[in-house]
Image (spheres, rainbow, N blue to C red):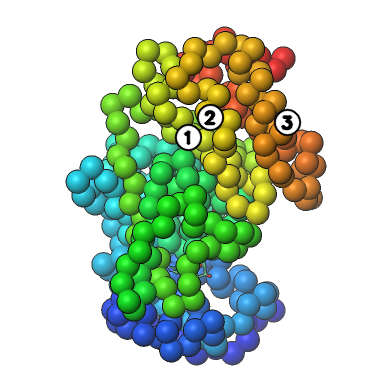
Amino acid sequence: MKASAFSYARATSVGNALELLAAYGDGAKVLSGGQSLMPAMNLRLISPELLVDIGDLGELRGVELVGGMLRIGALTRHVELLNSPEIAKHAPLLSEAIAHVAHPAIRNKGTLGGSLAHADPASELPACMLALSTAIVVRGQTGERRIAAKDFFTGIYQTALAADELLVAVELPVAQKDSVHFFHEFARRHGDYAIIGFAAQAIVRGGMFADLRIALFAVGDRPVLADVTARLTGVAITPALLSDAAAALAEELDPQEDQQASVAMRRHLAKVLLVRGVSALLDRPELSGVLA
Ligand SMILES: Cc1cc2nc3c(=O)[nH]c(=O)nc-3n(C[C@H](O)[C@H](O)[C@H](O)COP(=O)(O)OP(=O)(O)OC[C@H]3O[C@@H](n4cnc5c(N)ncnc54)[C@H](O)[C@@H]3O)c2cc1C
């Protein structure tokens, strides 16, 4: 199938893009890498009146360190995230996760902003934003606002972005000296959307979690920040405690059944991921057998 007829404008500046979005409202769609938008248009799932191509807006691309925060422009492509030494050093969770996003041809075109604005609940990068305590920076004609990642994703393919706003960047705290991370997803083939995935960022001191943030994806209509981390922080982790925490995580989640997995399967895999994640983050391989 082919897309319905639409008009096309190549934005010359962020201000110009915002003017076009304001003029067309819900009738306009931002075009970044096109890797999700174009298939959706070709399948006629959406039929925008106008595409606002932001591909020329170089100011929205790149990675910079600003006062202890990493600022990543919305137009930064997946491949650039994958190859960035700044990201490898200051946000290694992201470097690891991005290798699981689709395939090289898609990573060459797809952008961070597109992935976040698209808000697929099975997507890797939105979950990483939660685990990394990221602020999503959006701009409208009246100015900029910062939205905590946990408040940005509001439902399946839904975000807190208004139709006349542009996602311009994300800002995340750089990894500290004692920071550790863990990323894992179950997928049928490498590069497929996940059956379930797990992204964790922690600070470990004296063998205990001083801070722990775990985000799961493909477990509902949006990425989820796990509450169970409260049970695991500031205490010595025993096999019994971890086993109880795994059971609590399975209860906490409200996954859906689809062609990839049943609800019970997703709950079970979440427990497996928690046990593997905690064991790896604390470097305690003996904990990995607690579900056996
Ligand atoms: C075969 C295939 C496999 C894939 N596998 C995965 C996968 O495993 N994991 C995964 O996460 N993704 C996967 N993707 C999606 C891919 O990562 C896309 O690149 C990404 O979802 C969207 O990025 P984009 O730059 O291409 O956005 P586009 O397709 O250009 O836009 C996507 C949506 O975001 C909006 N948008 C884009 N940029 C902005 C902005 N700056 N401000 C406001 N709104 C904006 C658009 O209007 C549109 O609604 C896959 C895609 C394909 C085709």
- Report which quarter residue 158 is drawn in: bottom right
Where residue 182 sits: x, y (%)?
A: 48, 31
Q: What amino acid is labelled 3 in the image?
A: His
Disc 2 residue crowd, few under 14, some 14–19, many 20+, Cα 10 Å: some
Q: What element carries label 1?
A: strand
Q: Position of residue 119 (x, y in %)?
A: 55, 59
Q: Is mark 3 on a helix, strand or loop?
A: helix
Q: Which of marks 3 and 2 is nearer the N terminus?
A: 2
Q: Distance between the residues labelled 3 and 2?
A: 18 Å
Is any atom of residue 51 visible in this view?
yes
Callout 1 amino acid: Arg
Q: What residue appears at the point 79 percent right and 36 percent down from the top-left corner? A: 264
Within 10 Å of the Cα at label 1, are there few (<14), some (14-19), or many (20+) other Cα atoms? many
Residue hosting label 2 = 229
Mark 1 lies on residue: 213
Q: Disc 1, disc 2: CB below 8 Å?
A: yes
Q: How many labels does the image show?
A: 3
Residue 198 visible? The answer is no
* Tag of residue 268: 3
Q: Does label 2 point to a residue whose CB lies under 8 Å from ligand 1?
A: no
Is the C-beta separation of discs 3 and 1 under 8 Å?
Answer: no
Labels 1 and 2: the sequence-earlier one: 1
Q: Closer to the camera: disc 3 or disc 1?
A: 1
Question: From the viewer's perspective, is residue 274 above or below residue 110?
Answer: above
